[in-house]
Amino acid sequence: MNELATVGSAVIYQPPTATFTNSLEAEFLSYIDRKPTTEKGYKACLKQFARWRYENGIGAITRGTIKLYRDYLASSGLATGTQAQYLRAVKQLCKWAVAEGHIPADISDNIHGAKVNTGIYRKDAFQLKDVPVISATIDRSNEQGKRLYAMFLLVFVDGLRTIEIHRANVGDLKTIGGNMFLYIQGKGHDEKDAPKAITPEVQEALKDYLSSRTDHYTSKSPLFVGTSNKGKPGTRLYKTVTDPVTGAKEKVLDRISDGRISTTTISTMFKECFVNAGYDSDRLTAHSGRHTAATTALNDCGATLYEAQQLMGHASPSTTEIYIHAKDQLGIEMKYRQAIYDSYFKEAPAAHILPELEAELMTLTADQQREILAQIKAQKGDRTA
């Protein structure tokens, strides 16, 4: 009898423990045929579901069970995106069970969980003035500081993701036609086929870091490595295993580390860097640096939507548009909330800006806007003279 079976309209799963490790899970993961990281995510989600049922003494999976789990997730304090991910894995399992003939109908159909608003960005960007402030706090007198500074520039200038920094090897840095590029494995890609142009300043930071490394790296070595005893390349890493018969525990060699710095460590390093510079917010993470690169390109450097999409490696322009909409919304709020305040507390409310004039001003370069501002100030001076 399979672990998943039909009893009337109920689906039964019989885990010996809450670990959800059995042949059924292996069948399901084989069916979805995704990358190891995606399979790992599904496994973690299903493990959470099995643990919840185990702790609450729930043996049968029915439509009511899934609704109860949905309600539990809603009250758990988890982010809406995490709630949706957990529920989505369970619903995918049910669809698979129908396809494989384990159950006659999808008992999860039309059960809706937390709604994730994909039209907003959930991490804040830094302002232009913040970036040099943070940069100045990085101590570049040692290998750790040189490493952090190089990663900092790759994120804030080239818009790299932490996973792309993690995957990068020394040999991915290539000079072509006098220009340096870092070939990255972009989101959803299987190969390092996306070249990122490296500016001279970022090149200098990378060379400075590589010259400070104490390991004997090759082109196949990770671009960024750990400096602690456990993180250094060549470190022998052990794991504890339990003898299934005697129960005795023993440490055995797991692998020899290549020293590659993990995404978690990268995120922690950036967070500590921000906090040390005086920027302590749960909405400021390593990804905020990538967010800042995108908003700066769009709003301060004159990049078009298409150009910014190419810079950031977004598959869809709708992703890039989020950065524009966030700026537009903030501009509108600041403009009219200030007008409301002025109406309350100032004798003469500010005159409204004609929409067509504002639209024209937004098409001008910064120098052109400054020229017009100087003309306006000159005219106001003539009137008051």
Image (spheres, rainbow, N blue to C red):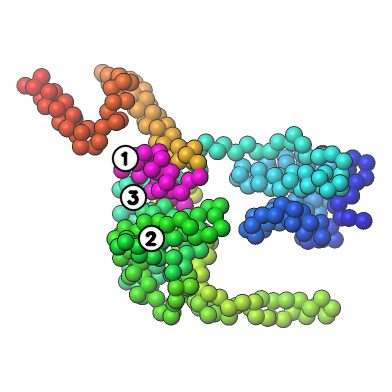
Q: Nearer the viewer, residue 187 or 117?
A: 187
Q: Mark 1 or mark 3, which is nearer the start of the sequence?
A: 3
Q: Nearer the viewer, mark 1 or mark 2?
A: 2
Q: Can you tell which mark lies on residue 360? A: none
Quarter of the image with the N terminus in it: bottom right
Crowding around mark 1 (Cα neighbors within 10 Å: few <14, some 14 to 19, many 20+) is some
Quarter of the image with the C terminus in it: top left
Cβ atoms under marks 3 and 1 closer than 8 Å: no
Mark 2 to mark 3 CA distance (whole Å) = 27 Å
What residue is disc 2 on? Answer: 181
Q: Main secondary structure of the magenta part?
A: helix
Query: What amino acid does circle 2 point to?
Result: Phe
User: Which residue range is magenta in the image?
Assistant: 287-315
Image location of residue 129, percent across then percent down = 30, 48
Q: Is residue 192 above or below residue 377?
A: below
Query: What amino acid does circle 3 point to?
Result: Asp
Q: Can you tell which mark lies on residue 130? A: 3
Query: Can residue 273 be spotted in the picture?
Result: no
Q: Is residue 23 above or below residue 84?
A: below
